[in-house]
Each structure stands twice: as structure tokens, then as C-alpha cells.
């Protein structure tokens, strides 16, 4: 209502006709559509930036895990790390 009052200013109630209200509604819808488009663009950019950060962190975690893992790419225990007791190695 505030934007309607601002837009129409001092127009008296009898001077408000159907066409004028429809015109106001269309203009306001266009403004809101433009605002929503801007917000969508900014939101997509923020989501993409967050995804890049997540991907970077996950890559670092995967790299760290693979460096410290006692298992090889085939799922078997690596040579030197295959120890079942203090003096027994496979």
C-alpha cells in the first residue's frame, strides 16, 4: 500500500479507475521481476562460490586421507604397512 500511495501521490479516490490500478500493478510486477532476477543471479553466484570452496576442502581431505591410508588402490594393505604384530610382517 505504501508504494501505491507513493506512486499515486495526491490522487483522490474517485480519480482512481480500473485502468490506472491495472497500470500500477503491471509496473510494480515488472519492478519486482527485475529485483527477483537480480536476486537469483546473486544467489546462483553465492551457491557456485560455496560449491567451489566445498570442492577444494573435499579435495584436500581426500588427498590427506590417500597419503595416510594403509591401503592401496586395490583395497589391499600396502607392503611395509602390513604388520600384524611387533616383529611379524607380511
Image (cartoon, helix red, strand yellow):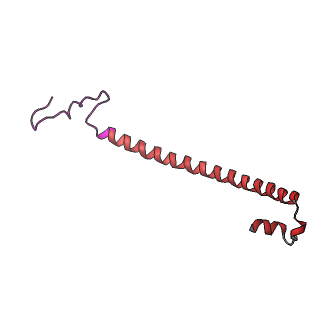
**Which x, y percent locates residue 43?**
60, 51
Location of the C terminus by quadrant is top left
View extreme (front): residue: 14
In the picture, measured across the screen, residue 67 lies left or right of residue 18, that is left
Please tell me whether the stretch drawn in magenta is mainly helix, strand or loop.
loop
Residue furthest to the top in view is 74
Magenta-drawn stretch contains 68 = yes
Is-magenta flag for residue 17? no
The picture quadrant where one finds residue 21 is bottom right
Picture quadrant of residue 86: top left
**Left or right: 31 in relation to 18:** left
Residue 67: where, in percent of width, then height?
A: 32, 39
Q: Nearer the viewer, residue 12 or 3?
A: 12
Identity of the residue drawn at 20% across and 35% down: 81
Of all residues, the one furthest to the left in this rendering is 87
Can you name the residue that lies furthest to the bottom here? 10
- Going by the image, does 59 lie left or right of 16? left
Quadrant in which the N terminus appears? bottom right
Where is residue 50? Give x, y as percent. 51, 49
Q: Nearer the viewer, residue 21 or 26?
A: 21
Residue 62 falls in image quadrant: top left
86 displayed left or right of 38: left
Magenta segment range? 66-90
Name the residue rendered at 40%, 44% in the picture.
Answer: 60
Task: Name the foreground residue: 36 vs 76.
Answer: 36
Amino acid at each position: 500500500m505504501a508504494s501505491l500511495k507513493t506512486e499515486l501521490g495526491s490522487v483522490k479516490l474517485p480519480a482512481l479507475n480500473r485502468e490506472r490500478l491495472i497500470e500500477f500493478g503491471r509496473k510494480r510486477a515488472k519492478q519486482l521481476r527485475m529485483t527477483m532476477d537480480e536476486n537469483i543471479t546473486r544467489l546462483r553466484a553465492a551457491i557456485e562460490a560455496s560449491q567451489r570452496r566445498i570442492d577444494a576442502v573435499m579435495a584436500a581431505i581426500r588427498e590427506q586421507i590417500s597419503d595416510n591410508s594403509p591401503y592401496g588402490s586395490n583395497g589391499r594393505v600396502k607392503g611395509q604397512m602390513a604388520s600384524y604384530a611387533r616383529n611379524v610382517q607380511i
